[in-house]
Image (cartoon, rainbow, N blue to C red):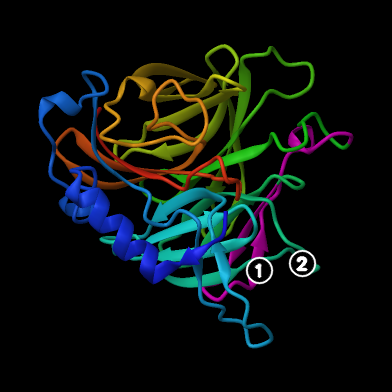
Amino acid sequence: MRPRTLRTALATLTAGLAAAGCLTAAGPATARERPPGNECSPSVSLTGFSDALDKTTYPGTHADSHADTFVGNLSALSQDRHGSLAALSDRSVLFRLDARTLEPRGALPLADEQGAALDSEGLVVDRDGTYLVSSETEPSVRRHSRTGEILDRLPVPDALRTAPAGGARANGSFEGLTLLPGGRTLLASMEYPLAGDPADLVRFQTWQRTGRGDFRLGAPYTYRTDTGLGVSETTATPDGRLLVLERGFTAGVGNTIRLHLAERRGTTLGKTLLADLAHCPSLGATARQPQPNPLLDNFEGMTVTGRTGSRLDVLIVSDDNQSAVQTTRFLRLRVRV
């Protein structure tokens, strides 16, 4: 599908969605809860969705190139302490987004130490404004400056490295990344099991921040997925528990997307199902391929954007894989934990 200009797409799609009653939140921090009819489950309600960035481009900003940057392939979201949003493409571009409109305000290319692109999947905006980014390539976790330079690289256990160096499958390692409240514990979630592990067991790895501000290896944890699903994102709640997004895809049927609440129990993570997103109202959303619910797509990124008592405002984004049959879609959820 031929990319459209960002300005035109935002104006057209945002107006159309708002007119249809689909785009409801003026901003993550001020989102209004919709009526009970928009419940996905007793714990989760859908407060809006937006396709405004789908198949759009951002004007080129490189001194050596005038090419526009495709806005898509979004695999992670993170909100900083000031409420600003960042979205990470798995094609090594970090977009700064307007928290109210979701319109990109900047595009920052990322690369490894040799200048090669990263398979970027997880993102944390740290308290000092630097970026912690996980990549499935090795896998790895790097710290990048606000302007993209590599400042540090965290240690990774040998067992979690991609085969043959370790037991991780290619394109199945560090998919999620989150910083727990207090800022001292960083956690990465594997997408799929290691070689030799049970088919429903995935590993989570933590790092502890030292007095010097860098990170050392911390405790590992195990998490049991639903049958046939992998972990596409993990996000800490303000009380230190975890929102875990599980995802699967079946050709001719579509995506399975389930949101769980997990908490640590020794070295394991117990979980409670919050919602199967197939049970959400579609609110007029359309799909370009078969889906159990036309609202569904390949959801990979998630961040908490606000809190009111026991209810969290959660923003989720899909990775369209730059495919004509997939959509870059943002969901706004109200989650009771």
Q: Which residues are magenta?
A: 140-164
Task: Answer yes or no: is residue 78 visible.
Answer: yes
Image coordinates of residue 285 in percent, x first then y, are: 34, 37
Q: Is residue 23 left or right of residue 67?
A: left
Q: Is residue 253 left or right of residue 171?
A: left
Image coordinates of residue 86 in percent, x first then y, are: 43, 60
Mark number displayed over residue 113: 2
Q: Is residue 144 magenta?
A: yes
Residue beneath disc 1: 150
Q: Is residue 15 magenta?
A: no
Give the residue at x 59% y 63%. Answer: 93
* On screen, residue 189 above or below 225: below
In front here: 56 or 114? Answer: 56
The kind of secondary structure element at disc 2 is loop
Report crowding for label 2: few under 14, some 14 to 19, many 20 or more residues within 10 A (C-alpha).
few
* On screen, residue 268 above or below 303: above
Q: Is residue 317 left or right of residue 222?
A: left
Residue furthest to the left: 35
For badge 2, the amino acid type reads: Glu
Give the residue at x 52% y 31%. Answer: 289
In front here: 91 or 10? Answer: 10
Image coordinates of residue 213 in percent, x first then y, are: 53, 61
For badge 1, the amino acid type reads: Ile
Q: Say whether disc 1 or disc 2 marks the residue closer to the N-terminus.
A: 2
Give the residue at x 12% y 25%. Answer: 36
The kind of secondary structure element at disc 1 is strand
Q: Are marks 1 and 2 in contact (CB under 8 Å)?
A: yes
Residue 236, quarter of picture: top left
Task: Answer yes or no: is residue 128 visible.
Answer: no
Residue furthest to the right: 164
In front here: 258 or 192? Answer: 258
